[in-house]
């Protein structure tokens, strides 16, 4: 008996494995050997019935229910039972078999307060939704813990326009334009989908220029500023992903987008600088140079971040626009040279010191200059690069209580 209950490294015994893989004859043999195997559990409280329901093995489901129907109501640790999981996967035959055994199973809720109909509308099989509603039409009115009924969840999903835009299907997107009037088209483009974004955001991220340009014709100012769940609008996304032509199209549509902010006060300029997209940086600087000094909530600006990542072309572009940016400090009192010496690109260190050699004398809040940082971190090459660009002797970089260790050449 113990051998039949032995589990693999994933925590499943032989019956769980056979049920999951859809081997009804082996399931029968195992149950004949020990019928109580149907009451065993795997990780997250998974039963053999749940394993079979998730994978869509109807013959296994029938065998297990004939042997022990009481297990039908057992749920995983997240509250989802066999009906929840088969409904989500679109296994209509299993949904019907479970409902035939226990119609009230459709009213069981998971830890989010969601029923099987809530799960079914997230899938693609409408026959599952029909089977559940036919069992009890009133169930679609049951709200989850967020106040959403199954109908709310269904209407929050992606529209056909969202899906076509995400896939980059420009023909399908333009087909909407031919059959929909301008007012309705504007509503469709600006409609928020299930993941908290309008139709413009996904094609922007994937670089579908033609679709972005077409959708902008029907996008109002608020729609262009709409953010995804992560808190970024279309311009932030295009800047981060390095799509300069889309950045230009968005700025032509609304140049004030360059002044918008994401989480932690991130600007499109900061997004592009962090990722190293020099063409995007040049476009943004040409459109609005005032944003060059704006910093994140931690005090780091575009120069800090590009210096840390070793993007020397961006560092030079920012310094060309505003040389004093190198003196701006973050909340630790650190400048861009402090960040640059933490990286691996000595050309960035040289560019910053060339802009103003005196900057390496600036102390942060921990009494460290830009030369203390690399010597402390054993970055000899960065320390040497900074020292060679300055005219001061090595001892002038020492401060009270913090002697500067000499980096070997």
Image: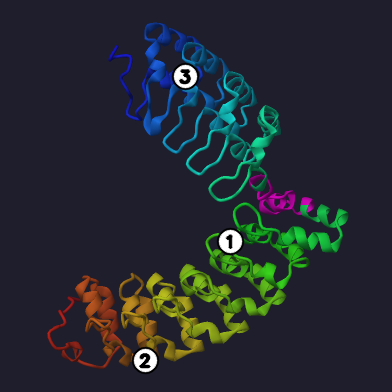
Q: How many marks?
A: 3
Q: Are marks 3 and 2 in contact (CB under 8 Å)?
A: no
The quarter in which the C terminus is drawn is bottom left
Q: Quadrant of residue 281?
A: bottom right
Q: What colour-coding does the image apply?
A: rainbow
SS assignment at label 1: loop
Q: Is residue 215 above or below residue 285?
A: above
Foreground: disc 2 or disc 1: 1
Q: Residue at x 73, y 70 (%)?
A: 220
Residue 124 in view (yes/no): no
Q: Residue at x 58, y 61 (%)?
A: 228
N-terminal of the two: label 3 or label 1? 3
N-terminal of the two: label 2 or label 1? 1
Region in magenta: 153-172
Residue lying furthest front: 138
N-terminal of the two: label 3 or label 2? 3
Q: Which mark is residue 358?
A: none
Horizontal and vertical percent position of residue 70: 47, 19
Reading the image, the residue beneath label 2 is 356
Front residue of this view, candidates 234 and 53: 53
Horizontal and vertical percent position of residue 143: 60, 45
Q: Which mark is residue 70?
A: 3
Q: CA distance from mark 3 to mark 1?
A: 44 Å
Front residue of this view, candidates 236 and 356: 236
SS assignment at label 2: loop
Reading the image, the residue beneath label 1 is 228
- Membership of 229 in magenta stretch: no
Foreground: disc 3 or disc 2: 3
304 horizontally vs 235: left or right: left
Q: CA distance from mark 3 to mark 2?
A: 78 Å
Q: CA distance from mark 2 to mark 1?
A: 40 Å
């Amino acid at each position: 008996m113990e051998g039949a209950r032995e589990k693999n490294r994933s925590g499943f015994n032989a019956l769980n494995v056979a049920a999951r893989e859809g081997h009804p004859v082996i399931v029968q043999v195992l149950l004949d050997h020990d019928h109580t195997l149907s009451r065993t559990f795997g990780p997250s409280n998974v039963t053999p019935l749940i394993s079979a329901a998730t994978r869509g093995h109807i013959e296994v489901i029938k065998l297990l229910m004939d042997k022990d129907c009481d297990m039908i109501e057992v749920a995983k640790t997240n509250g989802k039972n066999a009906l929840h999981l088969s409904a989500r996967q679109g296994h209509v035959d299993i949904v019907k078999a479970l409902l035939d055994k226990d119609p009230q199973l459709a009213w069981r809720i998971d830890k989010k307060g969601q029923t099987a109909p809530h799960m079914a509308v997230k899938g693609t099989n409408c026959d599952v939704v029909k089977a559940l509603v036919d069992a009890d039409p009133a169930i679609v009115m049951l709200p989850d813990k967020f106040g959403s009924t199954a109908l709310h969840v269904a209407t929050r999903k992606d529209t056909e326009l969202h899906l076509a835009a995400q896939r980059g299907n420009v023909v399908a997107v333009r087909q909407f334009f031919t059959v929909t009037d301008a007012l309705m088209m504007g509503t469709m483009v600006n409609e928020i989908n299930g993941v908290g974004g309008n139709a413009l955001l996904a094609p922007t991220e994937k670089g579908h220029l033609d679709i972005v340009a077409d959708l902008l014709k029907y996008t109002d100012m608020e729609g262009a500023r709409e953010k995804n769940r992560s808190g970024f609008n279309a311009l932030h996304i295009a800047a981060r992903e390095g799509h300069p032509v889309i950045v230009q199209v968005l700025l032509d549509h609304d140049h004030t987008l360059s002044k918008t902010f994401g989480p932690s006060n991130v600007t499109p300029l900061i997004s592009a600088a962090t990722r190293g997209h020099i063409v995007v940086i040049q476009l943004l600087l040409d459109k609005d140079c005032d944003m060059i000094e704006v910093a994140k909530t931690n005090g780091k600006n575009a120069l800090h971040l590009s210096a840390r990542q070793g993007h020397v072309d961006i560092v030079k572009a920012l310094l060309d626009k505003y040389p004093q940016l190198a003196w701006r400090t973050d909340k630790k009192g650190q400048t861009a040279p402090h960040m640059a010496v933490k990286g691996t690109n000595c050309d960035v260190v040289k560019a910053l010191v060339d802009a103003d050699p005196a900057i390496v004398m600036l102390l942060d809040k921990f009494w460290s200059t830009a030369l203390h940082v690399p010597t402390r971190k054993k970055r000899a090459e960065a320390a040497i690069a900074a020292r060679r660009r300055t005219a001061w002797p090595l001892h002038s970089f020492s401060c009270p209580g913090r002697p500067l260790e000499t980096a070997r050449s």
